């Protein structure tokens, strides 16, 4: 029995009020007394008619019968009222109710039995409540999402993981409004109709796609229409699927991008061992080129590994507080010498104080470093690269509903370079996509820098915006949800990461 059922019982068990409640006991008293007196009066009337008793004796006996019936009726009425009050008190009480002392032995015996029944019922109810709380707590603690559906496919309960996956407003909604995948809905319909347990894989769309395995399990007895309630459990298999895909992608990408530098290395080695074997000048020139190609392969492998690691955890949100201002300041310090070599000035703009986000400090450092490094590579000499921080409305930034303040941090990196033709902007975050392949390789780019930025932004549930105009430079802006949290003096991690 649930708490709601007990409350409903309490509401319906209240004693009647008003004039009817006052009249009924007395009406029962009169009727009961009359029923006790009726047999005696019938006997006296019969005896009187037979002439066996005088009128005086008959009157006296009738009076005695009336008094006796009234007395017995009064005693019964008192017992009934005592037991009624006790039953009312028991039905409305949550704790034990003392048995009243008034009343006859029979009334007290009945009240004692009612008290034992009440104690037994309370113990059973407390055990059921404790077991129900344990079950709810266990279900809340489970990291996998669970939904309970009734026989009409309406959500009647959900754990914390399910609310995090589908949103907080789940109860009372049809499963079709939460996951519009035909295979999943088909499995739910089949099991509701009496089918056996089903297992189905589907992709949950969103800022970051997740691949889930749903297990549809029936439980309980069929309803009036033959349908049965079901439990829907979800298991995130994104990592497993992406690991297989990344293995194939890594082999394809590595084999394609490493072919050119490897061919160059092999060609120069053959030249050094053959025609240029004794040419010292050729040795120095070729070794410098070979070193450059080897470093390029190293950068490529590092970026591919970084991209694979980020994609592997892209569907899992970070949990640590990070100061974006601290990250930007560290990146400026790390790239100051590189910017100085091209006579580029790095400028940090924005209001003072922390702009905290929930994130991965290493990945956010890599994101800012990649953007600033690209601005230095492709910006004009004797110019300025501006890193700006500001807060904006999350909805206006295209983030939709966000937890916390409803605000977002905008981190913009602007260069004063040649700019990017508009037709190239939609494809800039693709792997190995280059606007100018020759220039990209000349400045040491791998074609993976903006792909890394995109995946890091996705993991942090943010958005990347690119604005560029030929001849005026480019601006890359990352919007991340602002969190109103205290960093407690904690500094973001600043381990090195490669920029491309």
Image (cartoon, rainbow, N blue to C red):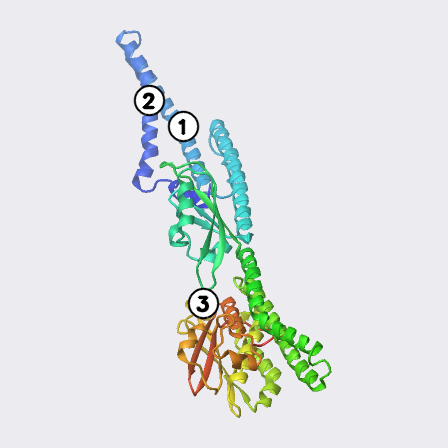
Q: Secondary structure at mark 2?
A: helix
Name the residue that disc number 3 marks.
Answer: 402
Tag 2 and tag 3, C-beta contact below 8 Å: no
Left or right of residue 57, residue 218 in this image:
right
Query: Residue 238 appears at what percent x and percent y?
Result: 52, 57
Q: CA distance from mark 1 to mark 2?
A: 13 Å
Q: In the rendered image of this protein, does residue 479 appear above or below residue 232?
A: below
Q: In the rendered image of this protein, does residue 264 appear above or below residue 332?
A: above
Q: Residue at x 51, y 74 (%)?
A: 450
Q: Residue at x 32, y 26 (%)?
A: 31
The answer to which image quadrant residue 244 occupies is: bottom right
For label 2, the crowd category at 10 Å Cα-Cα, with few meaning under 14, some 14 to 19 and many 20 or more, is: few
Closer-to-camera residue (237/444):
444
Q: CA distance from mark 3 to mark 1?
A: 70 Å
Name the residue that disc number 1 marks.
Answer: 76
Tag 1 and tag 2, C-beta contact below 8 Å: no
Q: Secondary structure at mark 1?
A: helix
Query: Residue 352 appears at what percent x and percent y?
Result: 53, 83
For the C terminus, the image quarter is bottom right
Name the residue that disc number 2 marks.
Answer: 35
Q: Residue at x 49, y 44 (%)?
A: 94
| N-term mark: 1 or 2 | 2
Residue 384 in view here = yes
For label 3, the crowd category at 10 Å Cα-Cα, with few meaning under 14, some 14 to 19 and many 20 or more, is: some
Q: Which mark is residue 362?
A: none
| N-term mark: 3 or 1 | 1
């Amino acid at each position: 029995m649930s708490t709601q059922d007990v409350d409903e019982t309490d509401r319906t068990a209240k004693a009647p009020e008003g004039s009817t409640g006052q009249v009924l006991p007395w009406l029962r008293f009169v009727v009961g007394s009359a029923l006790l007196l009726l047999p005696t009066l019938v006997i006296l009337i019969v005896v009187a008619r037979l002439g066996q008793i005088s009128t005086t004796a008959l009157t006296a006996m009738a009076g005695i019968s009336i008094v006796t019936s009234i007395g017995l009726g009064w005693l019964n009425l008192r017992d009934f009222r005592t037991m009624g009050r006790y039953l009312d008190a028991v039905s409305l009480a949550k704790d034990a109710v003392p048995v009243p002392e008034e009343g006859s032995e029979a009334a007290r015996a009945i009240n004692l039995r009612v008290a034992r029944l009440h104690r037994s019922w309370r113990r059973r109810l407390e055990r059921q409540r404790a077991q129900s709380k344990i079950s709810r707590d266990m279900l809340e603690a489970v990291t996998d999402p669970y939904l309970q559906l009734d026989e009409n496919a309406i959500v009647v309960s959900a754990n914390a993981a399910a609310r995090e996956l589908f949103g907080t407003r789940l109860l009372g909604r049809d499963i079709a409004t939460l996951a519009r995948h035909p295979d999943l809905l088909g499995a739910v319909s089949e099991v509701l109709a009496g089918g056996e347990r089903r297992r189905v894989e589907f992709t949950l769309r969103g800022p970051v796609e997740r691949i889930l395995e749903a297990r549809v399990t029936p439980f309980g007895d069929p309803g009036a229409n033959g349908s049965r309630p079901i439990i829907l459990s979800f298991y995130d298999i994104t990592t497993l699927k992406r690991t297989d895909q990344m293995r194939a992608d890594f082999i394809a990408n590595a084999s394609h991008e490493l072919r050119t530098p490897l061919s160059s290395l092999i060609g120069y080695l053959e030249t050094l061992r053959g025609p240029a074997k004794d040419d010292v000048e050729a040795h120095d020139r070729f070794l410098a080129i070979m070193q450059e190609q080897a470093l390029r392969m190293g950068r490529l492998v590092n970026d591919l590994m970084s991209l694979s690691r980020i994609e592997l955890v892209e569907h899992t949100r970070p949990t640590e507080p990070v100061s974006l201002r601290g990250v930007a300041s560290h990146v400026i310090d790390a790239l100051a010498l590189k910017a100085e070599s091209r006579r580029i000035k790095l400028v940090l703009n924005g209001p003072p104080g922390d702009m905290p986000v929930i994130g991965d400090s290493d990945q956010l450092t890599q994101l800012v470093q990649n953007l600033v490094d690209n601005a230095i590579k492709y910006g004009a000499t004797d110019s300025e690269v501006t890193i700006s921080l500001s807060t904006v409305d999350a909805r206006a930034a295209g983030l939709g509903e966000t937890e916390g303040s409803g605000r977002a941090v905008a981190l913009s990196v602007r260069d004063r370079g040649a700019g990017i033709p508009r037709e190239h902007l939609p494809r800039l975050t693709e792997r190995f996509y280059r606007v100018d392949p020759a220039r990209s390789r000349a400045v040491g780019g791998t074609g993976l820098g903006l792909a890394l930025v995109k995946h890091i932004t996705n993991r942090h549930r943010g958005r990347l915006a690119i604005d560029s105009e030929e001849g005026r430079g480019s601006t890359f802006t990352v919007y991340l949800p602002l969190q109103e949290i205290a960093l407690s003096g904690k500094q973001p991690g600043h381990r090195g990461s490669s920029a491309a």
